Amino acid sequence: MHPAQAVAATMAGLGEQACRCDLESRIRTYGALADVFAGSREEVCAAVGRLRGAGSWCSLAFYDDESIHALAREAEIAVRNPDAVSEFLVERRRLIGAESFDPFENVVSPCGAMYVTDDPDTLLESLSSTYAQAGYVVRFRVPCESHVAVELDFMRFLLECVRAQDPKAAEAAARFFIEHLSGWSLLFAVAFGDAAATPIARYAAVTLDRFLSCEESVVRHSVPARCVQHRLADLP
């Protein structure tokens, strides 16, 4: 059983303090994950350090925190080595493509439309409309509007709107997560992780998996009944 399938029942029995959702951390993590999966060399290097602790505000007993911390250390060392960063960028292109995705050359599709529908054109048109109506501009050169990096970055954008007190943004973020990012992205994280070999790729995969499992609880079950939004500075 994937952690996301069991987390709801677990969280429901833990009470209000089980999930301590820091909005700034969620914004930072969504943006950093987007950069790792589609950003430039410089963006990848800056993003890895921002991923440490992602999802740790949820009480998920299904992950080995020591192993995740070890992967974090390896990835943080790797981004200081230009050769290791180059190896990751080559591996990322091999696994998920770059400006295009070739199912005969690449390994794991990064596009949600390939996981969830047999009518991808309609879904992609709907996503383009959703982005435009929200005022979001795709900042990556990727093959599809449903690319994991784009959907992650759109969540960053929506949560930044929440921070700016847009009265409609919280509902929009929850709706987008449930209708688009949830589900398929966990399958992608597992598949990417199974194929990954470099430290940065392995860390990105497990962090995406853990963070999205936490978000499943935050979005579906913990807000507002079991989750209190606050800044890290407020933690005891």
Image (spheres, grey):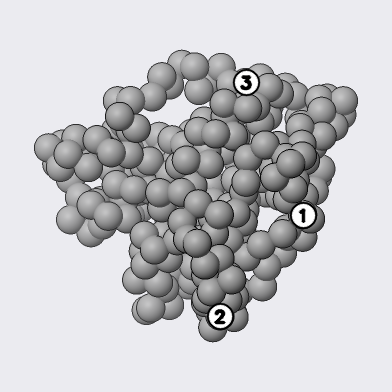
Residue occupying the point 62% across, 46% down: 109
Q: Secondary structure at mark 2?
A: helix
Determine the CA span between mark 1 and mark 3.
31 Å
Label 2 sits on residue: 129
Expressed as whole percent of the image width and height from the top left, the position of residue 152 reads 55, 55
Query: Separation of disc 2 and disc 3 at Cα?
Result: 40 Å
Q: Which residue is mark 3?
A: 73
First of labels 2, 1 by sequence position: 1
Q: Residue at x 63, y 27 (%)?
A: 195
Asked if residue 67 lies left or right of residue 142, the reply is left
Q: Quadrant of the C terminus?
A: top left
Residue placed under numbered mark 1 in the picture: 100
In the image, what residue type sits under mark 1? Ser
> Are the two marked residues, 2 and 3, in contact with CB atoms closer than 8 angstroms?
no
Work out whether residue 85 or residue 101 is closer to the camera in this orientation and state it: 101
Which of disc 3 and disc 2 is earlier in sequence?
A: 3
Which numbered mark, 2 or 3, is in the foreground of this view? Answer: 2
Q: Amino acid at mark 2?
A: Ser
Left or right: where does residue 221 sit relative to residue 109? left
* Residue 228 position in % (x across, y down): 27, 52
Give the residue at x 29% y 25%.
61
**157 above or below 17?**
below
